[in-house]
Image (cartoon, helix red, strand yellow):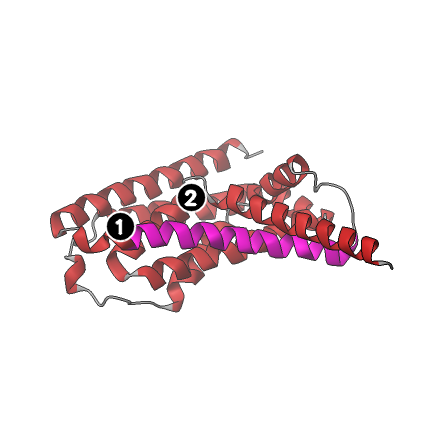
Amino acid sequence: MNSADTMLAAMTNAGLLARGVACGVIIAAPVGPVNVLCVQRTITKGWRSGLLSGLGSALADTIYGAVAGFSISFVIAFLISEVFWIRLFGGIVLIGLGVLYYFRSPASVQQRPPEETGHSDYVSTFFLTLTNPTTVLSFLAVLAALGLGHQRAWWLTFLVVFGIFIGSMVWWFILTGVVNRVRDRISGRTMLWVNRAGGLAIGTFGLITLTLSLASWR
């Protein structure tokens, strides 16, 4: 391979990585329960907690991105066939979380450890994201829109999937970083409304997920 071919291959690989990053941002950025949880946890427990919550979602997005990117048809077929039960479980969990956050005591941010974290932060968002099986269909649509829908060498697809993880984490870095900048200005009364708004938002997403589950019942 001459230098021109090497440069062309490098540009192609960089383009695939960049489009994978774009795909990760596009999937992660829309407002959803994980976004609400990341904001709430960043305010109440600190930047690391919010970022760990984003990490859990990013890992689940990467798994679904890999399923879509490698076109693992039997996995996609299973997710579609079991969409009722997966959505039913996810909807119930979201409603429960919404009630929990709505009635959470509005302790002042200053009274909390500045960087309180735990493995439950990323585990919870990981499973919340996995309980939305239509994410894999969203990835199929976005990958096609970005010109990534056709088959390619496995290592090139892996490059796209790696880009998806990077893109998702870029979004969570930005979101939690911005929220962390203003968290010290939030009073206990403001936290009361943050908890209520977050609880209502998460509960609403749960009701929508539950409704979609019932609509898909055959």
Residue on which disc 1 sits = 101
Percent position of residue 140, x then y: 65, 40
Q: In this view of the protein, which residue sits in the foreground, 173 or 97?
A: 173
Displayed quadrant of residue 10:
bottom right
* Image point (82%, 58%), residue name: 3
Residue 75 disc label: none
Displayed quadrant of residue 150:
top right
Q: Is residue 180 left or right of residue 206?
A: left
Q: Kindly identify the amino acid type of the residue bearing the numbered disc 2.
A: Gly
SS class, disc 2 = helix
Q: In this view of the protein, which residue sits in the foreground, 188 or 74?
A: 188
Q: Nearer the viewer, mark 2 or mark 1?
A: 1
* Image point (13%, 52%), residue name: 188
Q: Earlier in the sequence, mark 2 or mark 1?
A: 2
Q: Kindly identify the amino acid type of the residue bearing the numbered disc 1.
A: Tyr
Residue on which disc 2 sits = 91
Seen as rendered, the residue at the extreme right is: 1
* Image point (24%, 57%), residue name: 44
Percent position of residue 119, x then y: 40, 68
Q: Residues within 10 Å of mark 2 (few under 14, many from 20)?
A: many
Q: Quadrant of the C terminus?
A: top right
Question: Is 170 contained in the magenta span?
Answer: yes
Q: In this view of the protein, which residue sits in the foreground, 53 or 94?
A: 53
Where are the magenta residues, as a range?
Answer: 153-180
Tell me if residue 74 comes above or below residue 113 in the rendering: above
Q: Residues within 10 Å of mark 1 (few under 14, many from 20)?
A: many
Q: Is residue 211 left or right of residue 76?
A: left
SS class, disc 1 = helix
Q: Main secondary structure of the magenta part?
A: helix
Percent position of residue 155, x then y: 74, 59
Displayed quadrant of residue 180:
bottom left
